[in-house]
Image (cartoon, rainbow, N blue to C red):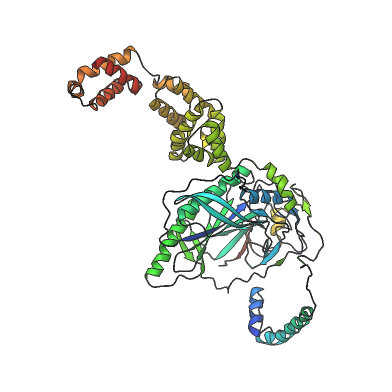
Amino acid sequence: MITKKDLEHMAWLSRLELSGEDTEKYTPKLNSVLDYFGELDKVDTEGVEPTYHVLQLSNVFRDDEPSQPTKPLSQEEALSNAPRKQDGFFKAPRMM
Amino acid sequence: MFDEPNKTNPPFSKGSSKYENPDGVKIGLEVHVQLNKLKTKVFCGCTTDYHNDPPNSHVCPVCLGLPGALPVINKKAVEAAIKVGLALNCKVEEHTQFYRKNYYYPDLPKGFQITQYDFPISSQGYVMIEGEDGEHRIGITRAHMEEDPGRLVHEGTIDKSKYTLIDYNRSGMALLEVVSDPDMRSPKEARRYLDKLRNILEYLDVFDGNLEGALRVDANISIMGGQRAEIKNISSHKGAERALLYEIVRQKNVLRRGGVVVLETRHFDEAREITLSMRSKEEAHDYRYFPEPDLVPLKISGWAPAIKETLPELPDARRMRFVEQYGIADDHAKALTSELKLAVFYEEVAKKADPKMAAVWICDVLKGELNYRDLTIDAFRKEHMLSVIELLASKKITEDGAVDIIRTLLDKGGSPEEIVAQKGLVVVEGDIVSTAAEEAIKENPQAVADYKAGKEKALNSLVGAVMKKTKGRADARAAREVLLGKLG
């Protein structure tokens, strides 16, 4: 059961600002999603290996070679979407 | 059945008395080691050689966390991680995989860090250190792989600056987080552990400790009757020791005043050598780890035996071999193997000179002179050490003369032969010593009388007089013999 407090906590973790109205609206919606997942609890998983990963693949590597597979960007390109920059740095609010 | 003796981990001598640990200090360290000998970052092809370049000049869509970019793991980074795990006596796990650790902090632009969680690549190891009461075992909880965050620059101090500047060149560097058990009982032991860890990493050739940010430490420390504090922002071995010393005093003071030592994260201010509470407004950490969908699991424990074959001789094994092969004292062997370059230097000298003399002169003299000048062994040439030992062995110079040569080489340069010639360090013997002895006897009647009256010590002042007359170039033992002969 997700409470309004849980929802406010999740919103904070994702840095989303919710109004009181939003909280009223989303709490029951999320609970219905959670209830739906509850269906899975009904499945008998006795003796079934846990799934660690959704893909049935392992050991995919790249060699230690520069510019493979992605090419580097120039400093100008790297900063081109930054709303604030200074002396080649990204600039962000101070965070503690 | 007897256990097979473990060659890489020799049994150490026990200390004579047990360390009491009166304050119940418990220290565990999380050491972030950059695998900076790789050519590229852990999940992308950006170079690891960024240290002298402008900010954000070695970045790509992957390490900038741009939408749609996909990480692919560097095979060499995995091999290096296994190497370290094996060298720390860890178990390399059969199944290992990556997770997203979710948090908002601008050091990583994606909103999460790719790291490991409940399937680390290696765990349950240990290293032996020189503890408060002899050899002490430090358990290794785990050594897991992760990506390095970017570097944050604050104007002024972290608690005063108005904004944060970010350089993502470091973002995505391969990191190994080595987490120890809380087995250290003093700041000194913490420092010894860090020294040992760094030494092992350098032997393995996966790590260059001289590069900025190569090794960063978070320390967890508690004392009896309180909760633990986590100290962040420690960037040197000395810093770790200082931060922990400060923290023990702080925690003791809190308890003495009847206060409560709370569970918290503190920031080490290196300039002021104090720790500051971060007073984080954020609620308890809630990282919501989940498997990284863009990286598939690794099944690499099968690589371990082959990698183990390629491991170089590690410090403890080399120390034992030095004792056996060269017949030197264990303390010398320990000092010589405490640093890879020093061990290599010694061994090259020992191959061509008397190994015992080489150990004495490198450990007891050269190392001290280097430390005094804040220099490393790189500042001294092995050919020069060979010359000095050769001059000593053939009795061409005295021990004082040899020390003088070593100091002069470090301060002014030149070659041992030139310094011997310039300073006139060639041992004087024969007539010169004989004449000096005769003069000394003539000029010091009181000492002669005292000696003849049975005061053996009076002879020392006569030897001193001879040394003074020969400007220290006589061999003291020879001078003594000559004096004894003349005094009858």
Q: Horizontal and vertical percent for residue A89? A: 63, 58
Asked if one can make out residue B110 in the rendered structure from this viewpoint, the answer is no
Q: Horizontal and vertical percent for residue B212? A: 57, 49
Q: Horizontal and vertical percent for residue B33? A: 61, 52
Asked if one can make out residue B290 in the rendered structure from this viewpoint, the answer is yes
Q: In the displayed image of the protein, which residue is found farthest to the top? A: B431
- The image shows residue B328, relative to residue B69, as above or below, that is above
- The quarter holding residue B113 reads bottom right
Q: Quadrant of the C terminus of chain B?
A: top left
- The image shows residue B380, relative to residue B55, as above or below, that is above
- The image shows residue B123, relative to residue B159, as above or below, that is above
Quick check: B35 left or right of B270?
Answer: right
Measuring 63% from the left and 64% from the top, which residue is drawn there?
Answer: B106
Depth order, front residue of B469/B82 = B82
Quick check: B309 left or right of B476?
Answer: right
- The quarter holding residue B349 reads top right
